[in-house]
Image (cartoon, rainbow, N blue to C red):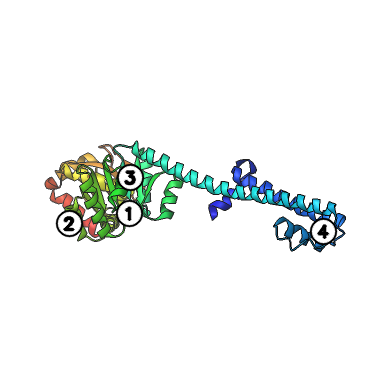
Amino acid sequence: MLSRLKLWLRPHSERSPGIQQIERGTLLFVFILLVGTVGYELIAGFGYVESLYMTIITIFSVGYGDAGVDTAGERFFTMALILSGTTIGLYIAGGVIRIIAEGEINRVVGNLMKSRNIEGLSGHTIICGYGRIGQIIAQELEEEGFSFVIVDLDEERIAMAEECGFLTVRGSAEDEAVLEDAGIKRAKSLITVLPIDSINVFITLTARNLNRSIRIIARGEQPSTKKKLEQAGADEVVLPAAIGASRMAESILRPTIVELFGDSSRMSLLSNDLKAMGLELDELALNAGDEFVGHSIREFEQKSQANFIVLAIRRADQSILQHPAHDTILKEGDNLIILSNPANITPILNSHTRRRELA
């Protein structure tokens, strides 16, 4: 309904031919009413109300007899009024039919063009579910220039995605035909982010059966679902609740690292990559009376007898010094972000780490 209203509110030059036809027909109809009313007043001598009444029943071919229409002139006028009214009525009806036909044609053409665009995709990503998480994923992929198709059963969400210019397939991702319409056999990856674990499991199973080589990333609400999703064929299972809790804990345990890297997803990816290489990011605090206060980073490294790199320092005034030089003097209240091998960390650094986490 809202879309129809927008059509009427568009500038005249942008309106469809069907709407313009209805507008012209309506104006002609009003003109015929005026001509008929004035004509019956002048020719037949009727009053204003009676003339309008005669005009309306004549145009709509009701008639009710020829009462009061006696002369040849009156009858010729009535016939002309009937022909004019009927013609205008058909003209308006044609405009209505034209609008309906245009809408259907545009819908069919739009679906055809969308299908052809999807058929031309290869190595794309299929996003199952366009809720809050699906919308964020779509925006991220679009910013990075990745091609993707959104699958959702909800008509409003599909409309939202199409307004953003995204390719969509309306239907349940549990249905093989829907996934095939989204190009599952040519896709490189599939992400299912519906809020119901059982549906994500079924979508994962269906997608894996259709494409053995596709990478599947699935959302799980309950930790117990992770194993089921992996058994169904998911390559990676993401637990949003667990990620959120971990992010909050990091804000307490390592606030400077969180502030420095900002985005939790980037921080998680970096942390995972470092752990794969046997490294770890950590945060050390220098408090009042600390033996390292007043010494340079070089002296700190030599005294602690540990292999690590100081990546940044957050001063007591909350300013952050990135890539500090070796001769930088450490001050009271400094928080040091270090990159180290946890296996080779010394007791001195461990004591600072525990002190920071318990502070």
The front one of 232 and 246 is 232
Dot 1 or dot 4: first in sequence order is: 4
Q: Nearer the viewer, mark 2 or mark 1?
A: 1
Q: Do the residues labelled 1 and 4 touch (CB within 8 Å)?
A: no
Instruction: Measure the alpha-carbon separation of dots 3 and 1.
Output: 11 Å
Q: Which amino acid does label 2 sit on?
A: Lys
Q: Mark 3: give few (<14), some (14-19) or many (20+) Cα within 10 Å.
A: some
Instruction: Measure the alpha-carbon separation of dots 1 and 4.
Output: 66 Å
Check the image and report above or below for 155 versus 328: below
The front one of 92 and 71 is 71
Dot 2 or dot 3: first in sequence order is: 3
Residue 227: which disc? 2
Left or right side of 205 for 333: right
Q: Which amino acid does label 1 sit on?
A: Ser
Return the residue at label 1: 172
The quarter holding residue 214 reads top left
